[in-house]
Amino acid sequence: MSSATPAPVSPPARRLPLAGVLRVGRPSDIWFKPALSVVAAIAPPNLTLLALGRLDLAMYTMAGSLCALYAHNRPYAARAGALVWVVLGMLGGLAVALVAASLTGSAVVLVTVGALLAAAQKVLCDATRVGPPGNVVLTFVSSASLFAPQTLAQVPGHLALAAATGVWAWLVCMAPVLVRPHGPERRATAAALKAAAAYADTGGTGEGRARARAAGYAAVQAAWQSLLCTSARSRTRRALERLVLRAEVALAAPAEADAGRLRAWAGALRGTGPVPQAGLERAAADELLGVDAARGLWARLGPLTPLAVRTALGCALAGYASLALGVGRPYWALVTAASLYQANVALTWSRAVQRVVGNVVGVLVFAAVVPLAHLGEAALVVCCLAFSFGAELLISRNYWLGSVCVTPMALLITEFAGYQKPGELMTERLVDTAVGALVGFVVAVAVTNRRASGRVERALTAADRARERAARLVAEQHPDAAALEAARRGLAVALADLRATADAAAGEWWLPALPRERVVLAEQAGHRTLAATARRQGLLPDRGRDTETEDARP
């Protein structure tokens, strides 16, 4: 640890960037999985209702079917449990909304209930790391249900429909286990290898090395988490663990890594062929001692109270403003506000721009498609299926592109109970989008998250302690192999946590000056120690004890 403590730099000028916010990126490697799953989950229930002439009930079957969007990046053992909780969470929010709708007709009360539900859903989804699409779908279901005509006697039947389609969505999402039981773990490992290869290309000194290194460690930690979600230590899992370890070692010493070999291993993980065998030496024995140190990676990064307050207050005020303007569907403004809130104000601003642009273009798409959708109920169902597929195809490229499909789909869903006036629907959607985005962002700026700076200090302390522990073990004559592996894993986790915490705090407003220079120095020292630790374990060529000990120093 350096004896000199750099002074905090002054906070940068707060700007609202537009460059890059709408840039289209590459699609997700598995975009087709949620896309096909949601279509398979929606189509049978909706076609059944169409045949029965009860398409007015599609709102409730859609609630369960949309659960098929979740947990596609998780191993199947973990996916099974996660989807159960998603379905139960969806049913819980839907039940509260339907009961509230049946007990009161006060729009103000209903908006308040919707805002509180949105805050609870946001906090629970963030705390449990449920992953995309997060709280937005759950909030859309519960908020829309608040303004659906309802009686208490109808609630059990509507919940039963949602539960039945939720079970069907669970089956759809679990079906691929029969074909490729280790698919998610293989994909996570391949992503870690590719990210490590990208960092190795920089040699640890080239342009963009900091971003590539951060992305590499994030991918490696995600791969460890994926592997640790499965309890069975099968031959496949052991082979994948060794490949992730190779990726981690490449990040510790990029100049000595073979990027081509890493990419070749990643390519071999496609399909269902055998997993490449990456031989390990000495301390990295068959049991991969200390690998369970990664279990704490996805612990909460800090208190979620400021985010909960932002969501509750922003959604409530957006709904009230919509009511004041005389809009008949204030839940659209509420959902818009709920969709904005990200890890910090800078990311919230970006999401607000993306949401507005996507919704405006989506309304124009709806105007073009509505004549086709009004040809009959079958055409309406087909259009909804097409837009649900398109949303998952595009949303991983950029959120605004996904919104181009989500917006017309949401508008068409309102017509399941009967055709509406397109001009009125489009006008209300545009007004609610503007109101929700404006009010939601203003609340995000007004509700400060001063705990973010404290989280950076705690992350710095944790990283320094982890580095010192690893350095002590490296300096020992005969360090315990298990302790050395646990120290290396713990340091890697601490450095990944430090980078994520610093990035989140850097995008917050109204904070004291952040110790940016201390963060950079801590990262540099930590990564040198990681390289020395890997070398001490025999995972890298031994350059001599003196050099090794020197590498462990800051």
Image (spheres, grey):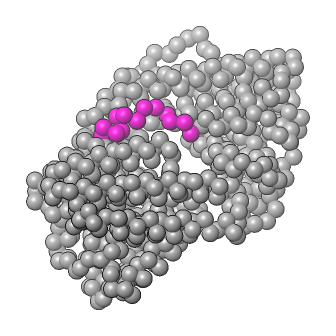
Residue that lies at the very extreme toward the right in this rendered image: 282
Pick whichever, 86 or 438, lies toward us.
86
- Which quadrant, please, contains the N terminus? top right
Asked if residue 67 lies left or right of residue 180, the reply is: left
Residue 239 image position (x, y, % from top left): 80, 51
Question: In this picture, is 324 found above or below 58?
Answer: above
Residue 515: x and y in percent read: 46, 22
Q: Does the magenta stretch include residue 305?
A: yes
Inspect this view and state whether residue 432 appears. no
Rendered position, 143 above or below 252: below
Specify the quadrant of the image occupied by residue 256: top right
Q: Position of residue 43 (x, y in %)?
A: 46, 78
Residue 106 vertical placement versus 6 (above, below)? below
The answer to whether any part of residue 312 appears in the image is yes
Q: Find the residue positioned furthest to the top.
A: 3
Decide: is 37 above or below 212: below
Residue at image coords 87%, 17%:
477
**Front in this rendered view, residue 215 or 129:** 129
> In this view, which residue lies farthest toward the bottom?
375
Q: How many labels does the image show?
A: 0
Magenta stretch?
Answer: 298-310
Residue at screen point 28% across, 43% down:
312
Viewed as shown, does residue 199 lie left or right of 480? Answer: left
35 or 78: which is nearer to us? 78
Residue extending farthest to the front is: 153
Q: In which quarter of the image is residue 200?
A: top right
Q: Which residue is drawn at 71% across and 37% down?
A: 292
Percent from the top left, x then y, of residue 27? Answer: 52, 62
Asked whether 238 falls inside the magenta stretch, the response is no
Q: In which quarter of the image is the C terminus?
A: top right
The residue at the point 42 percent across, 25 percent down is 453
- Whether residue 308 sits left or right of residue 495 in the image: it is left
